[in-house]
Image (cartoon, rainbow, N blue to C red):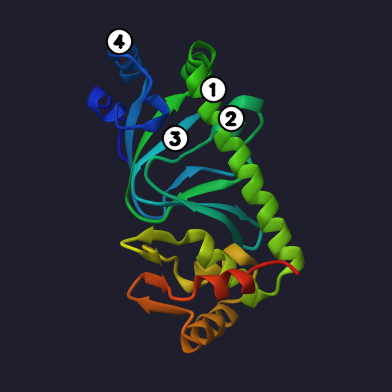
């Protein structure tokens, strides 16, 4: 991690969380916020440690994971620009329940705990954005639990691809697909099994892979395969 610096206020204006702020509020935020850089593999937050601030990702991607004593990990999600982590620990005062690690070089804004809580108390729109984000994460967790309990590995891979895909120029595509090992850690399977499933989906013309992209050719069939029965 590089030494923290005070960010340009113009950077804060690009963050959706602060989109409703006045210029004066942005200037105040800039005095609190630190701009940090993380190299690939660096830990932004560690499981079991105190959460010292809200971390807003400006660029790069991070993985949110739960490690075990043997060095294995379960990836809960992968996050990118404009997303943020750490709000749960700031709200309930408990240690971080997961580790957040940079998947690639990241530029991050850190908002200290006291500033974050003051921001929530003084701005209802920010509080609602944080609340909606927490509800979304809860729904995502419910969906993941359902997937692990009721869907086989084939279906889990199909569902994950559908969930990550975005519509671009009329096509559904995963722009930066995780590596197969990362997919395996996200769905609770082996890398070998994930490779076999991806190969089968490709052979059945349900998806097409191109470098780090996955194009969803038959979204309806993929969705049916990834649904709980």
Tell me if 38 is positioned left or right of 112 in this view: left
CA distance for labels 1 and 3:
16 Å
Asked if the residues shown at circle 2 and circle 1 are in contact, with their CB atoms under 8 angstroms apart, the answer is: yes
Label located before the other in sequence (3 or 2)? 3
Q: Which mark is residue 158?
A: none
Q: Quadrant of the N terminus?
A: top left
Residue at position x 32%, y 51% in the image: 105
Residue 110: x, y in percent?
A: 40, 30
Asked if the residues shown at circle 1 and circle 4 are in contact, with their CB atoms under 8 angstroms apart, the answer is: no
Tag 4 secondary structure: helix
CA distance for labels 3 and 4:
22 Å
Would you place residue 50 above or below residue 126 in this image?
below
Label located before the other in sequence (2 or 4)? 4
Tag 3 secondary structure: strand
Residue 54: x, y in percent?
A: 48, 30
Residue holding disc 4: 24
Tell me if 149 is positioned left or right of 115 in this view: right
Asked if the residues shown at circle 3 and circle 4 are in contact, with their CB atoms under 8 angstroms apart, the answer is: no
Residue at position x 40%, y 48% in the image: 80
Q: Which mark is residue 131?
A: 2
Label located before the other in sequence (1 or 4)? 4
């Amino acid at each position: 991690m590089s030494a923290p610096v005070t960010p340009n206020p113009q950077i804060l204006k690009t963050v959706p969380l602060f989109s409703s702020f006045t210029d004066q509020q942005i200037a105040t935020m800039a005095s609190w916020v630190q701009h940090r850089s993380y190299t690939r593999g660096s830990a932004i937050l560690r499981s079991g440690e105190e959460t010292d601030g809200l971390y807003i990702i400006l660029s790069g991607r991070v993985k949110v994971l739960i490690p075990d004593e043997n060095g294995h990990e379960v990836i809960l999600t992968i996050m990118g620009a404009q997303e943020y982590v750490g709000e749960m620990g700031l709200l309930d005062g408990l240690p971080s329940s997961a580790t957040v690690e940079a998947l690639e070089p990241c530029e991050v804004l850190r908002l200290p705990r006291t500033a974050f809580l003051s921001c929530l108390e003084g701005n209802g729109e920010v509080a609602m954005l944080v609340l909606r984000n927490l509800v979304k994460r809860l729904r995502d967790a419910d969906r993941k639990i359902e997937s692990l309990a009721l869907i086989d590995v084939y279906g889990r891979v199909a569902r994950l691809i559908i969930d990550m895909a975005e519509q671009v120029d009329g096509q559904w595509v995963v722009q930066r697909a995780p590596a197969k090992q990362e997919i395996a850690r996200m769905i609770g399977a082996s890398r070998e099994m994930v490779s076999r499933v991806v190969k089968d989906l490709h052979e059945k013309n349900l998806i097409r892979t191109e470098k780090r992209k996955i194009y969803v050719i038959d979204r309806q069939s993929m969705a049916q395969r990834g649904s709980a029965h």
